[in-house]
Image (spheres, rainbow, N blue to C red):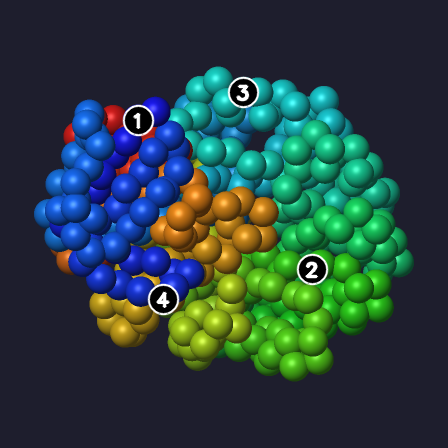
Amino acid sequence: MTTVAFINARLVDPKGGTDQVGDLLIRDGAIVDSGVNIAVTGLPDGTDIVECGGHVLAPGIVDFNVTIGEPGARHKESFRSGGMAAAAGGVTTMVTQADTDPPIDDPAVLEFVTRRAQEVCPVRVLSKATVTKGGLGKEMTEYRFLRDAGAVAFSDGERAIADPVVFRRCLEYARSVDALVCHFPQEPHFSALGSATEGLFATLRGLPGVPAAAEAIMLTRDIRIAALTGARYHANCISTAESLAVLSRARENGLDVTCSIAVPHFALNELDIADFRTFSKVSPPLRHEDDRSAMEEGIASGLIDVIVSAHRPQDEESKRLPYAQAASGGVGLETLLPVSLDLHHRAGLSLATLFERLSLTPARLVGLNAGHLGRGALADLVLFDPDAPRRIDRKALISKSKNSPFHERLVQGTVLGTWVGGKRVFGAEGD
């Protein structure tokens, strides 16, 4: 068994809410001890030492919303390139979306994806499967078979299920097998109308608008159906203050609902597309500053459970188009941590709380014993300097696609090392 001691580290543990200088001991891929002066009491012979230099050692990030191009769009992102990008960003587990080509709606496709990821990806990969066949919102997939094949949740990606009768049946079936359904709460008939948030800003630029209320309308419907069926429900990538009010009422009523936010929706607002910057075109579209500010408050209060990258690679041909015709999405595995650290540096969010949203809660959603530094947890770790300044350069990103909405943004935070199951996959010995 291999024993590794991380010494002189600033240990951030979201489970205990602690942030203290100490040491951490791992053996055979799991954490065995952590605390102050562990190394002083004596270490087993042959222990490998990692000197952390006072930098932060935290649980590896569990990114709950990642799109990989395999199968169907390997030129945009492969498991190999996506895994390397994840490791460089401190992401130790990618929970991948199911809206691939073909979609993951059959155990055979899921088994192919799982096998391919295990062969070439340096980080853990857990897969979602589609809620409906083909992700078309009409007919349920076989949740029980897909769960047995390894699906950790069910999602049709950025397609909302418009038919409430179909959605109810999906949740009823999901409830019977204790499956988590992740839904994109955007009323599709409204969302199909435009490419920017409806309002004066979009009008002045001649962009077709989508009402922000399209999100709360669908979210309200979803939560009512979740209450009716008793299913586990997760709202993907919320972005408006009105949605937070809907979620707050649901929580007060004791409903089992969770939600996530994509980094662009607390770090950017609609002004970031002022020059028709298509790399900032995401789905849902960037919102008003009041909504962006409300998202920060929702993260701090715990109303928003999970922060995700919503990594969605697009080739330049699909981005270098007039704004309304350009594809939505941006790469985010490598920028997830440094941009999220702005919540710590500027908004005063503690690192323990930040990693609860980045690591602990998403790990719990997929049943993974990770996201914390307690004994027995998987030794999935990230070592980083939270204060190191740098400018994001999309051309320097490892991802095959370079469509980052954060190109040239000044950030603080640099990953120094990433470990998965105790094995270093990025840093001095692994990059």
Q: Mark 4 to mark 2: distance in Å? A: 26 Å
Under mark 1, the amino acid is: Thr
Which tag, 4 or 2, sits closer to the chain's start?
4
The answer to whether 231 is drawn above or below residue 395 in the figure is below
**Residue 256: image x %, image y %?**
68, 66
The answer to whether 134 is drawn above or below residue 208 in the figure is above
Q: Residues within 10 Å of mark 3 (few under 14, many from 20)?
A: some
Which quarter of the rendering shows the C terminus?
Answer: top left
Looking at the rendered structure, the secondary structure element under dot 2 is strand
Residue 296 can be seen, yes or no = yes
Q: Name the residue under label 4.
A: 17
Q: Mark 3 points at which residue?
A: 116
User: Which mark is on residue 34?
Assistant: none
Which tag, 1 or 4, sits closer to the chain's start?
1
Q: Mark 3 to mark 2: distance in Å? A: 29 Å
Looking at the rendered structure, the secondary structure element under dot 1 is loop
